[in-house]
Image (tube, rainbow, N blue to C red):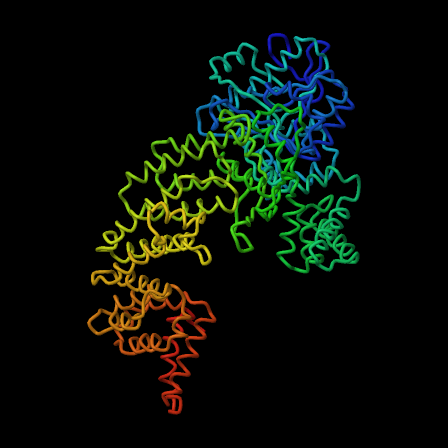
Amino acid sequence: MSADGTGTTVGKASVLTVGEASVWVLGVRHHGPGSARAVLAELERLTPDAILIEGPPEADALVALAPELEPPVALLAHVPGAPARAAFWPFAGFSPEWQAILYGTSAGIPVRFCDLPAAHSLADDRDDDEIPDMRADPIGSLAAAAGYDDAERWWEDVVEHRGDTPFEVIAEAMAAVREGYQPDEREARREAYMRRTIRAALKQGYARIAVICGAWHVPALTGSLPSAAADNTTLRGLPKVKAELTWVPWTYSRLASWSGYGAGITSPGWYHHLFGAPDRPVERWLAEAAAVLRDEGLAVSSAHVIESVRLANSLAALRGRPLAGLGEVTEAARAVLCEGDDLAVELIQRRMVVGDRLGHVSDGTPMVPLQRDLREQQRRLRLKPEALDRELDLDLRKALDLDRSRLLHRLRLLGVGWGTRGESRGKGTFRETWTLQWRPEHDLALIEQAALGTTVLAAAAQRATDLAGAESAALADLTSLVESCLLAELPEALPGVLAALSAKAALDTDVTHLMAALPAMVRAHRYGDVRGTSAEGLAVIVRSMLDRIRVGLPVAVTGLDDDAAGALLKHVDAVHTAVALLAEPGTPAEEPGSPAGEVASAQGGGASPRSRWLVTLRGISDRQDLHGLIEGRLTRILLDSGELDDAGDRMSRAMSRGQTPARAAAWVEGFLAGGGLLLVHDPRLLALVDGWLTGLSGDQFTDVLPLLRRTFGGFAVPERRAVGERLRSAGQDDGEGEQDVDERRAAAAVATVLAIIGRTGQ
């Protein structure tokens, strides 16, 4: 490359000379173990005095930290105050760029990045949070030219499994693929900046420069090159933003799905194995696969491993491959180790082919205070970030588990979904079950929220305050926020959130909104007992919301169609369950200090919330204009609560000839939504339903069949069986069992019954 920026190629295709200086351009495949080994060997042979690597030059200052990091890791570039503007450059231990960085830092050789600065790439206003490596697929093109339909397999055969493919051959292949190719504006700028960086290194006096970049870019950095003036013109006027960079942990699963810088690879665990195995990679891989299966309790012997190795090598020989690849070892494992079991193969795929490796960055890595505080809390609470799902059962009566729960809830408020809450296995509100999985995006989320506070506690409290003050916050959002504040132990934020909730509830005239919000409020009130947190003022809000629900519900149940009736009933059931929590057995309304007692005191009377609620339901249930679904459900609720002694009469009226079959079926659906055991234990109700069904005409029965099927099909299998046995015994008691049965006619009846209970075809 001459001083004016023109280029000449002397000797090998990937070598440039300028006077006494030499520039070696080593084209690699990102995340390729064969390329990594070749780069390391070539650097040791060339002994360069400077190394340039494809990547953002703002990260030059971070190179010195590389020996302290545990890959996979990634460079994270982000724009402060603009969370959508971010990009990652991931590196694995088998990435050739990473090996070049380690070689340079250990040998004291300057290592710099030479790609377009992140300040420019992040200023691109297109909706793209990833930095693409190339617009074409050169590996796929070369594989197709060689007669391969799988680019991964072709690369394994010619590079990974051979280890002797010279860089000049790769450069020539890329030149052939790029012949006639015109890069788009973004790619042209990237390659112009690479050439500018090379020129700058030459001017600084470096005489032996090694450039490690994607093989696709080699022709753009060698041969007849544009002048420096032309490159400067290409780079003139680039948009620019302020960008900050740091190292963050990465995962193999994320590397397997990545489509940005360097693209992704489908088998990072396999490539890790190929790079680290000193010899006999097939034997070592299948032996490790056997160990994984044994850990899961599967019987796999040494003989299995020997036979699977023989099969893998035989398959490779039949296919003309220099070494058994991932396809051959997977087929061998499936046939021999797994004995055809797809679940066992999937286990190997998840544990080994992809892998669960999560990288680690050192304490000296630049971090925002929020990241550093989380790291300290993870150590204190003994919660290690892991790439694979980890189930965590918490007992909130223990101080350590309670602190863990609070941390996970605070992170959820900040949009860091490290933990996903599941259903608790044990009974009681002092149990929580979480599934933990750390993802690289969580670091970005922490950086995005860094302006909210220097600690997780302070940031979560500020986030809750900001959400409560948003004009768009709906009533249900605010009630969920109250619950989150109590779960996360945010006493500073709770008063403001409660004030916003009270104001919103006072103005909301939609009773369904109030009904949707009340259950969360009742759950939140109970946390004061379970978690030892203060929920002052909550009782007054619960009282106000419940009173307004009781006043508005009679109007809300008027003139509803089928869909609206079904939607309202979900709210009724939720409120009924919530009210029961305010007056649990053994916690009478008048008992001081209990949730129900606080609500009752706030109401200024001795009547419990439950009794007031049931009075409202009883008044509504006596109306004649109710939708059948609602009337049936209210009847069942009141019956189960001990508030009715005429349920049979009500059912009889609902199923009388004066009612349409559709309304009667809806009534039955609402009434039986609580389960079918009631029919087993109450012969009169069962007889009423049976008599009504047998009295329907054929057309009427066809019309109501969907409702009946939905109702009876929702019963548990033991309930359906018990109902059938009760009907059979009732028929025998009436003497019907002694009559001859017409099998042909009975078959149609049996088919109908099976259709009703959702067992068609049995």
Nearest the camera: 617 or 150? 617
Q: Residue at x 53, y 27 (%)?
A: 447
Q: Is residue 30 above or below residue 677?
A: above
Q: Residue at x 21, y 55 (%)?
A: 559
Residue 386 lies in quadrant? top right
Nearest the camera: 139 or 688? 688
Locate the N terminus and report the quarter of the image it occupies. top right
Question: Residue 148: where, in percent of width, then height?
Answer: 62, 43
Residue 307 lies in quadrant? bottom right
Residue 283 placement, left or right of 609: right
Nearest the camera: 301 or 710? 710
Q: Residue at x 70, y 39 (%)?
A: 272
Residue 264 placement, left or right of 210: left
Locate the C terminus and report the quarter of the image it occupies. bottom left
How many circles with numbers are drawn on the protein?
Answer: 0
Question: Residue 554: where, in percent of width, then height?
Answer: 24, 54
